[in-house]
Image (spheres, rainbow, N blue to C red):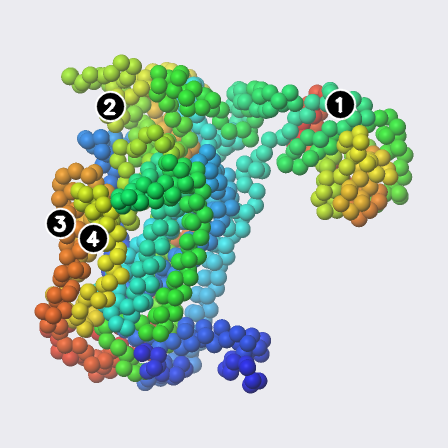
């Protein structure tokens, strides 16, 4: 080894030459080859990889769509329809992008749920979790601005309503909204800046994803038991075990994705967005895209304008402090008999909000939204902090591998005492 | 096999969670207009995952569009060249285009002029702009029909229902001046008059031109016009999913092999 | 923390104590893996194609209108430039002398041999795409005040290619004659290009 060169173990002379000067191959080998990964992942652990792949799909399709899209109020709608009709495979690329947004949110919702259920947000993974929430926020901003680009009725009125949220802030609100619009209503300047930012933000997301993964590779992965690996017997090298397992999940995911794209591409969209934007007529029933519905329901649950906006932002903000709200030392909900059911109730509240957000702002939906909103926040702010003190967790297994190698785990009571989940 | 089952249970659980988030939002087309209007199912052959457009019906629908609808409604996103996709020959499409005057220019004098349309031209817009359209229609705006079938929930059935839905208003329902009662239009008052009458058009293929038939044909034509890629998309989808199922089987086999020596 | 207790890479698979597959098992895994990889490669290829294809001319571009040109206002010796597919097309009403010179040029004097007759529909009308075959500049020679080059046709100022009165390359770096677009006379005084 020459001085100043990386001590590469790679045999191939060409790759070795590069690796000595820029050890990317050593790094890949370490982080994705031999990387010690808990041996007991279940299929919920696929969703991080699925999200990564979806981000790449969205960036690729988006770049090719941008080659044919015109960000101008007079041409945007027509240019999208031209992509659908005249550009070779334009319909395919657009439908993949359009449904890819929905698939992205499904995957990320499941990924977040996985983190909540198995306590992946707890020490030492707090920053990993926070970076994830940042990605989620960026995704929401990107998806919102992307939805504006086809310049249909829902694009226009969605943009109007969401940007008007900022008018709720006292004194500076109106100025902020005018600044966001670049005018006195949602118009061409708004469309142009949204296009610019919609193109930019995915690359910012990719950057934060890199940090997210880097942080993951410092702390190592959590696992369904929520206990730390105690030695080599508890882990497997990432490759080939989890590359193979992630591939299975990926193909199943692609089948679902393909079914949406090829057989019901407009199912998750709203028909009104095929009506060109009309600044003079608001559609009778405007709803955001489905993935925003829970947050939209929280907004509407509050009778006060500023209060609604604050609570809606708060519903995401609370995720940032989740690692410190949950005071229990036990990570996995498998060993937390009460918190587990509290969390399942929270999931139900989330779906109820999603359902109510798609309904008109009238009774009984408003009351239902209020109850669900109260529980959404109650879980984070009251139940979790209290349960950390009051709940008596089940006894944890000694190690990840032990129940396997000894042929049976420690005796655990109740439904939580599931046998070892192994891949 | 137990581990196989459990592995799948996990996978299914994870997927079900995703599916649930789809299901929670599925039936949202409850219109705010109050009462939900139930559209009769016209039983179109292109509905369903493997359906195709009835070419004869689409061609008749084109005739209805040309002879009836085109006076007020545009079809701007369609070009005359697209008509070969519903089974017309290029000469037939060219003849249809030649029967329409489109605006072109400016010429050497800097003036706009009219000329017979060519295959490459978009369908003629009946009005220069929205204001001209409103001025000619008592303030109502006849929308462009290019994407109308995907701009309305259950689009094709809606179009069929709307065109056959002109009935006498129920007792006590006041229809405003210049409006018409329609059983399927949201709010039931529509500015468009009942435009289809029996034998309004004479079909070349001898099909009886009942109102229902014409509505069915024009709905078929407009459903194609909104999503001309449908048949190609579905055919590609079948191939894609079959391929993925095979690849999925192989991948699963590889995964089993890889994990075979891990003691669970 | 997992990092610190990580087993060194290669050994990580071993602790389960299970002997790795027999040689036959290994072969089967390799074959299976290869088949799967091959399938996946085919899939990736099939997915890449639509993206590449999307950058080819779209259907509306391919169907782009032909251009009609009214020849009646063009006097003998004059030339006009019209736009076809976004490119300039030179339409020149040639004088009898220009036609004669073009016809009399021996093919041996030409870099890209072609008779004048093969390049026109009617001798007095020369229609060529006004794009230099070297690197795509538009040659001079349309306006009466333009430099027409040593052969009285067109002269490309970018790199000095000279074209004659039939639009053939005579001197300079351009390899080919100015292209003749497909066109036809729709009447005595009207042509349609494309």
Of A305 and A99, which appears nearest the observer?
Answer: A305
- Picture quadrant of residue A399: bottom left
Q: Residue at x 41, y 53 (%)?
A: A201
Residue B232 visible from this viewpoint: no
Q: Of the residues tagged 1 and 3, which is closer to the observer?
A: 3
Identify the subunit bearing mark 2. Answer: B
Residue A297 point in image, percent of width and height: 22, 46
**Label 1 CA crowd tier, 10 Å (few <14, some 14–19, many 20+):** some
Sequence-first disc among 3 and 4: 4
Q: Residue at x 43, y 49 (%)?
A: A197
Q: From the viewer's perspective, is C64 left or right of A127?
A: right
Residue for badge 4: A350
Q: Which mark is residue B188?
A: 2
- C-alpha separation, residue under disc 1 versus residue under disc 2: 62 Å
Q: Is residue C167 above or below residue B246?
A: above
- Picture quadrant of residue A278: top left
The mark tally for this picture is 4
Residue C97 visible from this viewpoint: yes
Q: Of the residues tagged 3 and 4, which is closer to the observer?
A: 3
**Label 2 CA crowd tier, 10 Å (few <14, some 14–19, many 20+):** some
Residue for badge 3: A371
Identify the subunit bearing mark 3. Answer: A
Of B26 and B40, which appears nearest the observer?
Answer: B26
Residue A282 point in image, percent of width and height: 30, 32
Identify the subunit bearing mark 4. Answer: A
């Amino acid at each position: 080894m020459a001085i100043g060169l990386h001590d590469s173990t790679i045999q191939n002379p060409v790759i070795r030459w590069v690796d000595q000067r820029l050890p990317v191959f050593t790094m890949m080998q370490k982080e994705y080859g031999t990387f010690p990964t808990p041996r007991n992942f279940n299929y919920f652990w696929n969703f991080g990889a699925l999200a990564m792949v979806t981000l790449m799909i969205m960036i690729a399709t988006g770049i090719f769509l941008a080659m044919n899209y015109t960000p101008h109020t007079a041409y945007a709608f027509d240019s999208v329809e031209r992509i659908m009709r005249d550009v070779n495979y334009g319909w395919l690329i657009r439908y993949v992008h359009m449904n890819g947004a929905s698939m992205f949110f499904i995957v990320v919702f499941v990924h977040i749920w996985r983190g909540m259920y198995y306590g992946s947000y707890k020490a030492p993974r707090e920053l990993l979790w926070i970076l994830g929430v940042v990605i989620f926020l960026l995704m929401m901003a990107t998806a919102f601005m992307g939805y504006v680009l086809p310049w249909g009725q829902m694009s226009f009125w969605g943009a109007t309503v969401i940007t008007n949220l900022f008018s709720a802030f006292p004194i500076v609100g109106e100025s902020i909204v005018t600044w966001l619009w670049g005018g006195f209503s949602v118009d061409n300047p708004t469309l142009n800046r949204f296009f610019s930012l919609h193109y930019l933000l995915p690359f910012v997301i990719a950057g934060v994803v890199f940090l997210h993964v880097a942080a993951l590779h410092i702390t190592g992965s959590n696992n369904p038991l929520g206990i730390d690996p105690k030695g080599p017997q508890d882990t497997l090298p990432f490759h080939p075990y989890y590359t193979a397992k992630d591939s299975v999940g990926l193909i199943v995911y692609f089948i679902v994705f393909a079914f949406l794209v090829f057989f019901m591409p407009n199912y998750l969209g709203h028909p009104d967005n095929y009506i060109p934007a009309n600044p003079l007529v608001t559609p009778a029933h405007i709803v955001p895209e489905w993935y925003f519905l829970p947050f939209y329901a929280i907004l509407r649950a509050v009778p006060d304008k500023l209060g609604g906006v604050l609570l809606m932002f708060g519903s995401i903000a609370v995720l940032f402090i989740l690692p410190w709200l949950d005071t229990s030392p036990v990570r996995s909900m498998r060993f937390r008999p009460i918190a587990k059911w509290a969390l399942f109730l929270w999931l139900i509240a989330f779906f109820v909000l999603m359902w109510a957000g798609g309904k008109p702002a009238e009774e009984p939906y408003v009351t239902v939204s209020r109850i669900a909103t109260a529980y959404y926040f109650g879980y984070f702010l009251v139940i979790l902090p209290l349960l950390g003190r009051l709940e008596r967790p089940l006894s944890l297994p000694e190690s990840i591998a032990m129940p396997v190698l000894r042929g049976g785990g420690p005796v655990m009571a109740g439904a939580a005492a599931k046998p070892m989940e192994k891949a | 096999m137990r581990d196989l089952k459990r592995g799948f249970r996990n996978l299914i659980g994870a997927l079900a969670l995703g599916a649930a988030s789809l299901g929670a939002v599925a039936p949202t087309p409850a219109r705010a207009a109050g009462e939900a209007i139930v559209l009769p199912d016209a039983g179109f052959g292109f509905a369903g995952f493997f359906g195709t457009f009835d070419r004869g019906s689409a061609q008749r629908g084109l005739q209805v569009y040309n002879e009836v609808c085109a006076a007020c409604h545009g079809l701007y996103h369609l070009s005359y060249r697209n008509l070969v996709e519903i089974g017309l020959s290029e000469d037939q499409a060219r003849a249809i285009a030649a029967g329409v005057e489109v605006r072109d220019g400016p010429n050497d004098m800097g003036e706009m002029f009219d000329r017979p349309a060519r295959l490459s031209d978009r369908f003629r817009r009946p009005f220069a702009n929205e204001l001209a359209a409103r001025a000619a229609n008592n303030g109502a705006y006849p929308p462009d029909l290019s994407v109308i079938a995907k701009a309305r929930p259950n689009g094709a059935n809606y179009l069929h229902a709307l065109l056959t839905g002109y009935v006498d208003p129920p007792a006590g329902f006041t229809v405003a001046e210049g409006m018409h009662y329609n059983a399927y239009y949201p709010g039931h008052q529509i500015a468009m008059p009942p435009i289809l009458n029996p034998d309004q058009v004479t079909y070349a293929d001898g099909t009886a031109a009942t109102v229902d038939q014409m509505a069915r044909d024009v709905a078929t034509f407009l459903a194609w016009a909104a999503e001309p890629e449908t048949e190609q998309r579905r055919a590609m989808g079948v191939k894609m999913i079959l391929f993925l199922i095979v690849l999925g089987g192989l991948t699963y086999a590889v995964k089993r092999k890889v994990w075979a020596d891990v003691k669970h | 923390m997992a990092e610190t207790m990580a087993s060194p890479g290669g050994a990580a698979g071993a602790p389960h104590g299970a002997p790795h597959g027999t040689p036959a098992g290994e072969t089967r895994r390799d074959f299976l893996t290869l088949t799967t990889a091959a399938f996946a490669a085919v899939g990736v290829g099939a997915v890449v194609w639509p993206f590449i294809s999307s950058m080819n001319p779209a259907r509306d571009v391919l169907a782009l209108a032909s251009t009609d040109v009214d020849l009646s206002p063009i006097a003998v010796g004059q030339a006009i430039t019209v736009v076809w597919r976004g490119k300039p097309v030179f339409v020149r009403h040639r004088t009898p002398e220009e036609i004669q010179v073009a016809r009399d040029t021996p093919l041996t004097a030409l870099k890209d041999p072609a008779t004048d007759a093969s390049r026109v529909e009617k001798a007095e009308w020369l229609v060529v795409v006004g794009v230099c075959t070297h690197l795509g500049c538009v040659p001079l020679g349309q306006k009466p005040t333009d430099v027409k080059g040593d052969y009285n046709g067109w002269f490309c100022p970018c790199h000095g290619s000279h074209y004659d009165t039939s639009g053939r390359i005579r001197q300079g770096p351009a390899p080919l004659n100015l292209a003749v677009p497909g066109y036809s006379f729709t009447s005595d005084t009207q042509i349609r290009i494309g």
